[in-house]
Image (cartoon, rainbow, N blue to C red):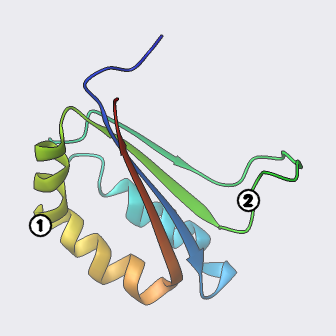
């Protein structure tokens, strides 16, 4: 099934301390009630070992939104701001975001 009218926000997190993985995952779960999110996936690297697969990150977040405006609203939602300040910024050494929209 082809996803239509979808804004995809995919975030990869690299931890400063690998022992904080569950803490970051718990923090990501605080985002679940944000009304602008259509769907959410919180994951860790799969056991796939091909040359093109980057498994260097520790945790990933995949969010689907109905529109770019919904994603913009998510960015300033107080729950997201608290997550960034209390989890992502102190726990992560690197965060990479890939946003995409339908063509």
Between 4 and 44, the residue placed more toward the observer is 4
Left or right side of 4 for 97 = right
Query: Residue 54: image x %, image y %?
Result: 73, 59
At 64% across and 87% down in the image, what residue appears?
Answer: 17
Name the spot of residue 35 as percent of width and height, x first: 15, 41
Residue 74, image quadrant: bottom left
* Between marks 2 and 1 in the image, the one whose residue lies nearer the viewer: 2
SS at mark 1? helix
The disc at residue 97 is none
Q: Crowding at label 1, few (<14), some or many (≥20) Cα neighbours within 10 Å?
A: few
Question: Dividing the image into 4 quarters, which one contains the C terminus?
Answer: top left
- Residue marked by disc 1: 78
Q: In the depicted view, which residue is nearer to us: 43 or 25?
A: 43
Q: Residues within 10 Å of mark 2 (few under 14, many from 20)?
A: few
The numbered dot on residue 54 is 2
Q: Residue at x 75, y 47 (%)?
A: 46
How far from the left and from the top, in percent, is residue 34? 19, 48
Residue 82, by quadrant, is bottom left
Which residue: 58% across, 62% down?
59
- The outermost residue toward the top is 1
14 to the left or right of 49:
left
């Amino acid at each position: 099934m082809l996803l239509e009218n979808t804004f995809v926000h995919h975030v990869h997190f690299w931890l400063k301390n690998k022992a904080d993985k569950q803490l970051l995952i718990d923090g990501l779960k605080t985002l679940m009630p944000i009304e602008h999110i259509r769907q959410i996936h919180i994951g860790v690297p799969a056991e796939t070992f091909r040359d093109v697969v980057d498994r260097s990150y520790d945790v990933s977040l995949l969010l689907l939104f109905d529109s770019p405006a919904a994603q913009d609203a998510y960015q300033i939602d107080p729950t997201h701001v608290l997550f960034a300040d209390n989890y992502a910024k102190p726990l992560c050494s690197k965060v990479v975001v890939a946003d995409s929209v339908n063509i």
